Image (cartoon, rainbow, N blue to C red):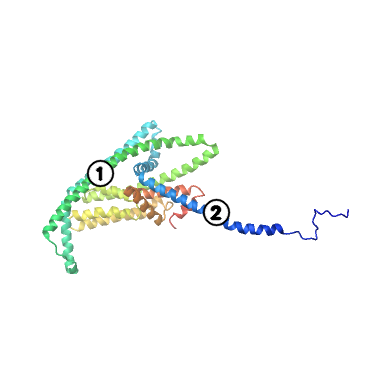
Amino acid sequence: MGAIDPRVPDAGVAAPQTDAIDMEPKTTSAGPVLRRASSLVGLRTLAFVLVIAATSLYLLERLEPVLRPLLIAILLSYLFLPAYTRLRRYMRPIFSFLIIAVGISLGLQGLARMVYRDVVLINHNLPRYLMREAELEGHVRQLSKSLLPWLQRPRSMESAGESEDSLTIELSQRIVRGAATAFMTVFFESIVVAFYMIFLLQSASRLPNRIRSSFSPERARGILEITQSINRAISEYLVVKVKASLLVGIPVGLACWAFGITGAVTWGMITFFGNFLPYLGALVAIVPPLVLAFLEFPTFGPPILFALILLSIHGVTANLIEPTMTGKALGLSPLIVLIGLAFWSLLWGFVGMVLAVPMTVIFKIVLEQTPATRPLALLISEDE
Protein backbone atom coordinates (compact mmCIF):
# COMPACT_ATOMS: atom_id res chain seq x y z
CA MET A 1 0.00 0.00 0.00
CA GLY A 2 2.84 2.37 0.94
CA ALA A 3 4.84 1.65 -2.23
CA ILE A 4 5.02 4.42 -4.76
CA ASP A 5 4.80 3.62 -8.43
CA PRO A 6 7.77 5.22 -10.15
CA ARG A 7 5.75 5.73 -13.36
CA VAL A 8 3.28 8.07 -11.58
CA PRO A 9 4.73 11.54 -10.86
CA ASP A 10 4.38 12.96 -7.39
CA ALA A 11 1.79 15.65 -6.99
CA GLY A 12 4.24 17.84 -5.08
CA VAL A 13 6.94 17.61 -7.71
CA ALA A 14 6.63 19.89 -10.73
CA ALA A 15 6.45 18.15 -14.05
CA PRO A 16 9.26 18.95 -16.46
CA GLN A 17 8.43 21.58 -19.13
CA THR A 18 10.52 20.10 -21.89
CA ASP A 19 7.57 19.79 -24.28
CA ALA A 20 6.62 23.46 -23.94
CA ILE A 21 10.22 24.55 -24.29
CA ASP A 22 10.70 22.43 -27.39
CA MET A 23 7.53 23.68 -29.05
CA GLU A 24 8.32 27.41 -28.90
CA PRO A 25 11.21 27.43 -31.39
CA LYS A 26 9.23 25.26 -33.80
CA THR A 27 6.34 27.77 -33.78
CA THR A 28 8.59 30.78 -34.32
CA SER A 29 10.51 29.08 -37.10
CA ALA A 30 7.26 28.08 -38.93
CA GLY A 31 5.89 31.66 -39.00
CA PRO A 32 8.08 33.03 -41.83
CA VAL A 33 7.52 29.87 -43.85
CA LEU A 34 3.75 30.24 -43.59
CA ARG A 35 3.91 33.92 -44.48
CA ARG A 36 6.12 33.16 -47.48
CA ALA A 37 3.72 30.45 -48.62
CA SER A 38 0.71 32.77 -48.32
CA SER A 39 2.52 35.47 -50.31
CA LEU A 40 3.32 32.94 -53.03
CA VAL A 41 -0.33 31.90 -53.17
CA GLY A 42 -1.36 35.56 -53.50
CA LEU A 43 1.14 36.12 -56.32
CA ARG A 44 -0.06 33.02 -58.12
CA THR A 45 -3.68 34.19 -57.82
CA LEU A 46 -2.77 37.65 -59.11
CA ALA A 47 -0.85 36.17 -62.04
CA PHE A 48 -3.77 33.86 -62.82
CA VAL A 49 -6.22 36.79 -62.81
CA LEU A 50 -3.95 38.87 -65.06
CA VAL A 51 -3.56 36.01 -67.53
CA ILE A 52 -7.35 35.53 -67.67
CA ALA A 53 -7.91 39.29 -68.16
CA ALA A 54 -5.30 39.52 -70.93
CA THR A 55 -6.71 36.45 -72.67
CA SER A 56 -10.25 37.80 -72.43
CA LEU A 57 -9.23 41.15 -73.93
CA TYR A 58 -7.43 39.43 -76.78
CA LEU A 59 -10.39 37.17 -77.53
CA LEU A 60 -12.86 40.06 -77.36
CA GLU A 61 -10.83 42.00 -79.89
CA ARG A 62 -10.08 39.11 -82.23
CA LEU A 63 -13.58 37.59 -82.10
CA GLU A 64 -15.40 40.89 -82.69
CA PRO A 65 -17.05 39.71 -85.96
CA VAL A 66 -18.61 36.81 -84.05
CA LEU A 67 -19.29 38.29 -80.61
CA ARG A 68 -20.72 41.64 -81.72
CA PRO A 69 -23.72 40.24 -83.65
CA LEU A 70 -24.17 37.63 -80.92
CA LEU A 71 -24.48 40.29 -78.20
CA ILE A 72 -26.84 42.33 -80.39
CA ALA A 73 -28.94 39.21 -80.93
CA ILE A 74 -29.02 38.52 -77.17
CA LEU A 75 -30.24 42.05 -76.42
CA LEU A 76 -32.85 41.86 -79.17
CA SER A 77 -33.97 38.46 -77.88
CA TYR A 78 -34.70 40.00 -74.48
CA LEU A 79 -36.70 42.71 -76.23
CA PHE A 80 -38.74 40.37 -78.42
CA LEU A 81 -39.11 37.43 -76.06
CA PRO A 82 -42.53 38.63 -74.76
CA ALA A 83 -43.76 39.08 -78.34
CA TYR A 84 -42.44 35.63 -79.26
CA THR A 85 -44.23 34.11 -76.28
CA ARG A 86 -47.52 35.70 -77.36
CA LEU A 87 -47.07 34.60 -80.98
CA ARG A 88 -46.55 30.99 -79.91
CA ARG A 89 -50.10 30.91 -78.59
CA TYR A 90 -51.50 31.40 -82.08
CA MET A 91 -48.98 29.68 -84.39
CA ARG A 92 -46.20 27.15 -84.55
CA PRO A 93 -42.80 28.16 -83.09
CA ILE A 94 -41.04 28.07 -86.47
CA PHE A 95 -43.41 30.72 -87.87
CA SER A 96 -42.89 32.85 -84.77
CA PHE A 97 -39.13 32.65 -85.31
CA LEU A 98 -39.44 33.61 -88.94
CA ILE A 99 -41.79 36.55 -88.34
CA ILE A 100 -39.55 38.12 -85.70
CA ALA A 101 -36.22 37.38 -87.42
CA VAL A 102 -37.32 38.43 -90.89
CA GLY A 103 -39.05 41.53 -89.51
CA ILE A 104 -35.92 42.64 -87.65
CA SER A 105 -33.69 41.93 -90.64
CA LEU A 106 -35.92 43.83 -93.06
CA GLY A 107 -36.32 46.70 -90.59
CA LEU A 108 -32.57 47.12 -90.12
CA GLN A 109 -31.96 46.93 -93.84
CA GLY A 110 -34.71 49.48 -94.53
CA LEU A 111 -33.26 51.91 -92.00
CA ALA A 112 -29.78 51.39 -93.43
CA ARG A 113 -31.10 52.11 -96.94
CA MET A 114 -32.77 55.35 -95.80
CA VAL A 115 -29.60 56.44 -93.99
CA TYR A 116 -27.58 55.71 -97.13
CA ARG A 117 -29.98 57.83 -99.16
CA ASP A 118 -29.60 60.70 -96.69
CA VAL A 119 -25.81 60.45 -96.86
CA VAL A 120 -25.88 60.54 -100.66
CA LEU A 121 -28.16 63.59 -100.55
CA ILE A 122 -25.87 65.36 -98.09
CA ASN A 123 -22.93 64.53 -100.33
CA HIS A 124 -24.84 65.98 -103.32
CA ASN A 125 -25.40 69.23 -101.41
CA LEU A 126 -21.79 69.41 -100.22
CA PRO A 127 -20.71 72.20 -102.65
CA ARG A 128 -23.60 74.37 -101.45
CA TYR A 129 -22.62 73.70 -97.85
CA LEU A 130 -19.04 74.71 -98.59
CA MET A 131 -20.21 77.95 -100.17
CA ARG A 132 -22.34 78.71 -97.13
CA GLU A 133 -19.42 77.82 -94.88
CA ALA A 134 -17.21 80.26 -96.80
CA GLU A 135 -19.88 82.92 -96.39
CA LEU A 136 -20.10 82.31 -92.64
CA GLU A 137 -16.32 82.37 -92.46
CA GLY A 138 -16.35 85.76 -94.18
CA HIS A 139 -18.80 87.12 -91.63
CA VAL A 140 -16.62 85.81 -88.81
CA ARG A 141 -13.52 87.37 -90.39
CA GLN A 142 -15.24 90.73 -90.73
CA LEU A 143 -16.34 90.56 -87.11
CA SER A 144 -12.91 89.53 -85.88
CA LYS A 145 -11.22 92.18 -88.05
CA SER A 146 -12.65 94.91 -85.87
CA LEU A 147 -12.31 93.06 -82.59
CA LEU A 148 -9.10 91.04 -83.03
CA PRO A 149 -7.12 92.45 -85.96
CA TRP A 150 -3.97 90.50 -85.10
CA LEU A 151 -5.74 87.24 -86.02
CA GLN A 152 -5.99 88.21 -89.69
CA ARG A 153 -3.63 86.33 -92.00
CA PRO A 154 -3.37 87.09 -95.72
CA ARG A 155 -3.73 84.13 -98.06
CA SER A 156 -3.59 83.57 -101.79
CA MET A 157 -7.04 83.29 -103.36
CA GLU A 158 -5.94 81.00 -106.20
CA SER A 159 -4.23 78.48 -103.96
CA ALA A 160 -7.13 78.63 -101.55
CA GLY A 161 -9.64 77.93 -104.34
CA GLU A 162 -7.65 75.00 -105.68
CA SER A 163 -7.19 73.48 -102.24
CA GLU A 164 -10.91 73.83 -101.47
CA ASP A 165 -11.88 72.12 -104.74
CA SER A 166 -9.54 69.19 -104.13
CA LEU A 167 -10.75 68.96 -100.55
CA THR A 168 -14.38 68.89 -101.72
CA ILE A 169 -13.72 66.06 -104.18
CA GLU A 170 -11.77 64.02 -101.62
CA LEU A 171 -14.36 64.56 -98.90
CA SER A 172 -17.19 63.62 -101.26
CA GLN A 173 -15.48 60.38 -102.23
CA ARG A 174 -14.80 59.48 -98.61
CA ILE A 175 -18.42 60.11 -97.60
CA VAL A 176 -19.82 57.92 -100.37
CA ARG A 177 -17.33 55.11 -99.75
CA GLY A 178 -17.98 55.21 -96.01
CA ALA A 179 -21.74 55.17 -96.48
CA ALA A 180 -21.56 52.25 -98.92
CA THR A 181 -19.31 50.28 -96.58
CA ALA A 182 -21.59 50.93 -93.60
CA PHE A 183 -24.65 49.90 -95.61
CA MET A 184 -23.10 46.58 -96.66
CA THR A 185 -21.91 45.94 -93.10
CA VAL A 186 -25.41 46.51 -91.67
CA PHE A 187 -26.94 44.37 -94.44
CA PHE A 188 -24.81 41.29 -93.77
CA GLU A 189 -24.70 41.72 -89.99
CA SER A 190 -28.50 41.97 -89.79
CA ILE A 191 -28.74 38.56 -91.49
CA VAL A 192 -26.30 37.07 -88.97
CA VAL A 193 -28.24 38.65 -86.08
CA ALA A 194 -31.48 37.18 -87.42
CA PHE A 195 -29.99 33.66 -87.50
CA TYR A 196 -28.63 34.06 -83.98
CA MET A 197 -32.03 35.19 -82.74
CA ILE A 198 -33.77 32.13 -84.18
CA PHE A 199 -31.60 29.78 -82.14
CA LEU A 200 -31.61 31.98 -79.03
CA LEU A 201 -35.40 32.19 -78.91
CA GLN A 202 -35.66 28.46 -79.54
CA SER A 203 -33.20 27.71 -76.72
CA ALA A 204 -34.93 30.14 -74.36
CA SER A 205 -38.25 28.36 -74.80
CA ARG A 206 -36.70 24.95 -74.03
CA LEU A 207 -34.40 26.03 -71.18
CA PRO A 208 -36.90 25.59 -68.28
CA ASN A 209 -37.66 21.98 -69.24
CA ARG A 210 -33.96 21.19 -69.52
CA ILE A 211 -33.30 22.63 -66.07
CA ARG A 212 -36.15 20.61 -64.55
CA SER A 213 -34.84 17.41 -66.12
CA SER A 214 -31.21 18.06 -65.09
CA PHE A 215 -31.64 18.95 -61.38
CA SER A 216 -33.73 17.89 -58.44
CA PRO A 217 -37.14 19.59 -58.07
CA GLU A 218 -36.04 21.91 -55.25
CA ARG A 219 -32.76 22.82 -56.95
CA ALA A 220 -34.44 23.34 -60.30
CA ARG A 221 -37.08 25.57 -58.68
CA GLY A 222 -34.37 27.78 -57.16
CA ILE A 223 -32.42 28.03 -60.43
CA LEU A 224 -35.58 28.91 -62.37
CA GLU A 225 -36.53 31.62 -59.86
CA ILE A 226 -33.10 33.25 -60.18
CA THR A 227 -33.02 33.05 -63.98
CA GLN A 228 -36.56 34.34 -64.30
CA SER A 229 -35.85 37.30 -62.02
CA ILE A 230 -32.70 38.13 -64.00
CA ASN A 231 -34.49 37.81 -67.34
CA ARG A 232 -37.42 39.90 -66.12
CA ALA A 233 -35.19 42.71 -64.86
CA ILE A 234 -33.09 42.76 -68.04
CA SER A 235 -36.15 42.70 -70.28
CA GLU A 236 -37.85 45.51 -68.35
CA TYR A 237 -34.73 47.67 -68.49
CA LEU A 238 -34.23 47.19 -72.23
CA VAL A 239 -37.90 47.77 -73.05
CA VAL A 240 -38.02 50.97 -70.99
CA LYS A 241 -34.72 52.22 -72.46
CA VAL A 242 -35.88 51.57 -76.01
CA LYS A 243 -39.18 53.38 -75.32
CA ALA A 244 -37.33 56.36 -73.83
CA SER A 245 -34.96 56.44 -76.82
CA LEU A 246 -37.92 56.39 -79.21
CA LEU A 247 -39.53 59.26 -77.28
CA VAL A 248 -36.48 61.41 -77.96
CA GLY A 249 -35.50 60.05 -81.41
CA ILE A 250 -38.89 60.41 -83.10
CA PRO A 251 -39.46 64.07 -82.04
CA VAL A 252 -35.95 64.99 -83.17
CA GLY A 253 -36.56 63.35 -86.56
CA LEU A 254 -39.90 65.15 -86.90
CA ALA A 255 -38.30 68.47 -85.96
CA CYS A 256 -35.61 67.97 -88.62
CA TRP A 257 -38.30 67.12 -91.17
CA ALA A 258 -40.43 70.14 -90.19
CA PHE A 259 -37.50 72.53 -90.57
CA GLY A 260 -36.41 70.91 -93.83
CA ILE A 261 -33.06 69.67 -92.50
CA THR A 262 -31.51 67.12 -94.84
CA GLY A 263 -31.28 63.62 -93.35
CA ALA A 264 -34.15 63.63 -90.86
CA VAL A 265 -34.16 59.82 -90.60
CA THR A 266 -30.41 59.75 -90.02
CA TRP A 267 -30.50 62.35 -87.25
CA GLY A 268 -33.43 60.58 -85.61
CA MET A 269 -31.51 57.29 -85.62
CA ILE A 270 -28.37 58.94 -84.25
CA THR A 271 -30.47 60.47 -81.48
CA PHE A 272 -32.06 57.08 -80.74
CA PHE A 273 -28.72 55.30 -80.38
CA GLY A 274 -27.12 58.31 -78.70
CA ASN A 275 -29.64 58.05 -75.88
CA PHE A 276 -27.83 54.86 -74.81
CA LEU A 277 -24.66 56.94 -74.23
CA PRO A 278 -24.91 58.91 -70.98
CA TYR A 279 -23.22 62.33 -70.88
CA LEU A 280 -22.08 62.03 -74.53
CA GLY A 281 -25.15 60.92 -76.46
CA ALA A 282 -26.94 64.26 -76.33
CA LEU A 283 -23.86 66.09 -77.60
CA VAL A 284 -23.42 63.61 -80.46
CA ALA A 285 -27.11 63.89 -81.38
CA ILE A 286 -27.44 67.70 -81.24
CA VAL A 287 -24.28 69.05 -82.85
CA PRO A 288 -24.43 67.50 -86.40
CA PRO A 289 -28.02 68.52 -87.30
CA LEU A 290 -27.48 71.93 -85.73
CA VAL A 291 -24.35 72.55 -87.83
CA LEU A 292 -26.26 71.40 -90.90
CA ALA A 293 -29.08 73.83 -90.07
CA PHE A 294 -26.66 76.77 -90.03
CA LEU A 295 -25.33 75.63 -93.41
CA GLU A 296 -28.76 75.24 -95.03
CA PHE A 297 -30.52 78.42 -93.86
CA PRO A 298 -29.42 81.83 -95.17
CA THR A 299 -30.26 83.57 -91.87
CA PHE A 300 -29.60 82.79 -88.22
CA GLY A 301 -33.21 82.85 -86.99
CA PRO A 302 -34.38 79.33 -87.99
CA PRO A 303 -31.20 77.55 -86.82
CA ILE A 304 -31.44 79.23 -83.41
CA LEU A 305 -35.11 78.25 -83.07
CA PHE A 306 -34.20 74.72 -84.19
CA ALA A 307 -31.46 74.59 -81.54
CA LEU A 308 -33.90 75.64 -78.82
CA ILE A 309 -36.36 72.93 -79.89
CA LEU A 310 -33.64 70.24 -79.85
CA LEU A 311 -32.44 71.33 -76.41
CA SER A 312 -36.02 71.31 -75.11
CA ILE A 313 -36.66 67.78 -76.45
CA HIS A 314 -33.47 66.40 -74.89
CA GLY A 315 -33.98 68.27 -71.63
CA VAL A 316 -37.57 67.14 -71.12
CA THR A 317 -36.75 63.54 -72.04
CA ALA A 318 -33.61 63.29 -69.91
CA ASN A 319 -34.94 65.10 -66.83
CA LEU A 320 -38.65 64.26 -66.75
CA ILE A 321 -39.78 61.39 -68.98
CA GLU A 322 -36.92 58.90 -68.70
CA PRO A 323 -36.43 59.19 -64.89
CA THR A 324 -40.17 58.61 -64.47
CA MET A 325 -40.03 55.49 -66.63
CA THR A 326 -36.78 53.94 -65.38
CA GLY A 327 -36.45 55.31 -61.86
CA LYS A 328 -33.13 55.17 -60.02
CA ALA A 329 -33.02 51.45 -59.32
CA LEU A 330 -30.68 50.78 -62.25
CA GLY A 331 -28.45 53.83 -61.79
CA LEU A 332 -24.74 53.35 -62.37
CA SER A 333 -21.82 55.29 -61.02
CA PRO A 334 -20.67 57.94 -63.54
CA LEU A 335 -17.11 56.66 -63.20
CA ILE A 336 -18.20 53.12 -64.08
CA VAL A 337 -20.16 54.45 -67.07
CA LEU A 338 -17.17 56.39 -68.42
CA ILE A 339 -14.84 53.42 -67.91
CA GLY A 340 -17.30 51.14 -69.70
CA LEU A 341 -17.67 53.58 -72.61
CA ALA A 342 -13.90 53.94 -72.97
CA PHE A 343 -13.32 50.19 -72.75
CA TRP A 344 -15.97 49.03 -75.23
CA SER A 345 -15.36 51.89 -77.67
CA LEU A 346 -11.68 50.94 -77.72
CA LEU A 347 -12.62 47.35 -78.55
CA TRP A 348 -15.61 47.69 -80.89
CA GLY A 349 -15.88 51.36 -81.85
CA PHE A 350 -19.28 53.07 -81.99
CA VAL A 351 -21.18 49.79 -81.67
CA GLY A 352 -19.23 49.08 -78.47
CA MET A 353 -20.18 52.49 -77.10
CA VAL A 354 -23.87 51.80 -77.74
CA LEU A 355 -23.66 48.35 -76.13
CA ALA A 356 -21.48 49.46 -73.20
CA VAL A 357 -24.15 50.82 -70.85
CA PRO A 358 -26.77 48.08 -71.47
CA MET A 359 -24.15 45.38 -70.88
CA THR A 360 -22.93 47.11 -67.71
CA VAL A 361 -26.50 47.41 -66.41
CA ILE A 362 -27.15 43.73 -67.22
CA PHE A 363 -23.97 42.80 -65.35
CA LYS A 364 -25.18 44.83 -62.36
CA ILE A 365 -28.60 43.14 -62.48
CA VAL A 366 -26.96 39.71 -62.42
CA LEU A 367 -24.83 40.71 -59.43
CA GLU A 368 -27.89 41.93 -57.52
CA GLN A 369 -29.68 38.60 -57.71
CA THR A 370 -27.33 36.65 -55.42
CA PRO A 371 -26.36 37.66 -51.84
CA ALA A 372 -22.67 36.81 -52.39
CA THR A 373 -22.24 39.32 -55.23
CA ARG A 374 -24.70 41.97 -54.07
CA PRO A 375 -21.94 44.11 -52.44
CA LEU A 376 -20.22 44.37 -55.85
CA ALA A 377 -23.48 45.62 -57.35
CA LEU A 378 -23.65 48.31 -54.65
CA LEU A 379 -20.07 49.38 -55.43
CA ILE A 380 -20.85 50.15 -59.08
CA SER A 381 -24.23 51.76 -58.30
CA GLU A 382 -24.85 55.46 -58.31
CA ASP A 383 -24.31 57.15 -54.96
CA GLU A 384 -27.49 58.34 -53.36
In this view, 219 is above or below 143: above
Which residue lies at the image location 74% right of the left edge and 59% below the top edge?
16
Which residue lies at the image location 69% right of the left edge and 59% below the top edge?
21
Image quarter in which the C terminus is found:
bottom left
Judge whether residue 220 can be spotted in this image: yes
Instruction: Give left or right: position of 378 versus 3.
Output: left
In this view, 229 is above or below 312: above
Q: Amino acid at mark 2?
A: Ala
Instruction: Give left or right: position of 19 versus 259.
Output: right
Neighbor class of circle 2 (other Cα within 10 Å; few <14, some 14-19, many 20+) is few
Residue 37, numbered circle: 2
Q: Amino acid at mark 1?
A: Thr
Residue placed most toward the observer, 282 or 354: 354
* Mark positioned earlier in the residue sequence (2 or 1): 2
* Coordinates of residue 174 in the picture (x, y in percent): 21, 48
Q: Which residue extends farthest top? A: 92
The image quarter in which residue 77 lies: top left
Q: Identify residue for label 1.
A: 181
The image quarter in which residue 15 lies: bottom right
Q: Total number of numbered labels?
A: 2
Residue placed most toward the observer, 342 or 83: 342
Spatial separation of the CA atoms under disc 2 and disc 1: 57 Å
Neighbor class of circle 1 (other Cα within 10 Å; few <14, some 14-19, many 20+) is few
In this view, 87 is above or below 264: above
Which residue lies at the image location 87% right of the left edge and 54% below the top edge?
3
Judge whether residue 298 can be spotted in this image: no
* Coordinates of residue 339 in the picture (x, y in percent): 38, 54
